[in-house]
Image (tube, grey):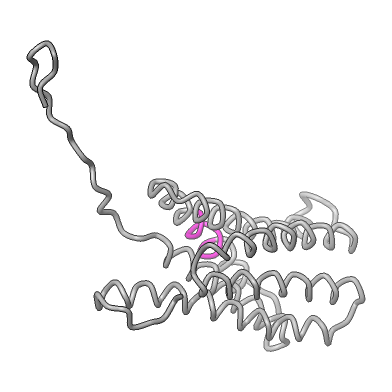
């Protein structure tokens, strides 16, 4: 391109060839959700395996995926992965901080407020997914329902509702894994093998 001053300039286009970070974020969220909800469903006690998953995979790996989404100019992915990554770290902190003497144990009302604000956030994110894929609509719809069940179970002190929440949470986590692994499979096979909507 030549300017009025006779100087020749070239237009350079930069193409983003970095990997899609969404599968990492979806799997970090999904696998950690499955593991926690296996506990909620009554299959095993809450322990270091879930805490480690919450900090390192559900937490740190998901935050890394969110930062990578920021580089991709994906506001939804950035917000979702970084927020839920810190959700997992916060949840582990809520449980472990009192054990190490950093704070007093949270009250039932405080925990319900914690679940409520995350449930509200998840509900709005679910509404946003109606402009995105069907797979994400399912993930965020199930996640919103999970928070509703957790709120009800904790408010009423009902083990049965919490176990139902656990089963529903396992399904939610598996749906996120499906969405993440489906994206990888479609990319690797360069065709639409897994329907994501």
Which residue does the image show at 90% across and 71% down from the upper left? 155
Left or right, 189 with respect to 36, comes to left
The image position of residue 41, as x and y in percent, is: 71, 86
The image position of residue 49, as x and y in percent, is: 59, 74
Q: Which quadrant of the rendered structure holds the N terminus?
A: top left
Which residue does the image show at 31% across and 59% down from the upper left? 19
Q: In this rendering, is residue 111 above or below 4?
A: below
Which residue does the image show at 59% across and 79% down from the upper left? 34
The secondary structure making up most of the magenta span is helix
Q: In this rendering, is residue 67 above or below 84?
A: above
- Residue at the outermost top position: 5
The image position of residue 181, as x and y in percent, is: 40, 76
Between residue 114 and residue 36, name the one nearer to us: 114
Range of magenta residues:
56-63
- Residue at the outermost front position: 4
| Membership of 44 in magenta stretch | no
- Quarter of the image where one finds residue 159: bottom right
Between residue 29 and residue 16, name the one nearer to us: 16
């Amino acid at each position: 391109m030549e300017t009025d001053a006779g100087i020749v300039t070239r237009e350079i286009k930069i193409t983003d060839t970095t990997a899609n970070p969404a599968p990492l974020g979806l799997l970090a969220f999904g696998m950690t959700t499955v593991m926690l909800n296996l506990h909620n469903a009554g299959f095993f006690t809450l322990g270091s395996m879930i805490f480690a998953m919450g900090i390192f995979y559900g937490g740190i790996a998901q935050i890394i995926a969110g930062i990578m989404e920021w580089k991709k100019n994906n506001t939804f992915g950035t917000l979702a992965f970084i927020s839920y990554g810190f959700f997992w770290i916060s949840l582990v902190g809520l449980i472990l901080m009192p054990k190490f003497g950093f704070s007093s144990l949270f009250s039932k009302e405080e925990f319900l407020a914690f679940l409520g604000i995350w449930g509200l956030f998840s509900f709005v994110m679910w509404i946003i997914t109606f402009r995105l894929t069907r797979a994400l609509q399912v993930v965020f719809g199930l996640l919103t329902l999970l928070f509703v069940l957790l709120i009800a179970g904790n408010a009423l002190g009902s083990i049965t509702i919490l176990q139902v929440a656990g089963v529903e949470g396992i399904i939610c986590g598996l749906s996120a894994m499906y969405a993440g692994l489906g994206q990888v499979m479609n990319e690797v096979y360069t065709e639409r093998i897994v329907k994501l909507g």
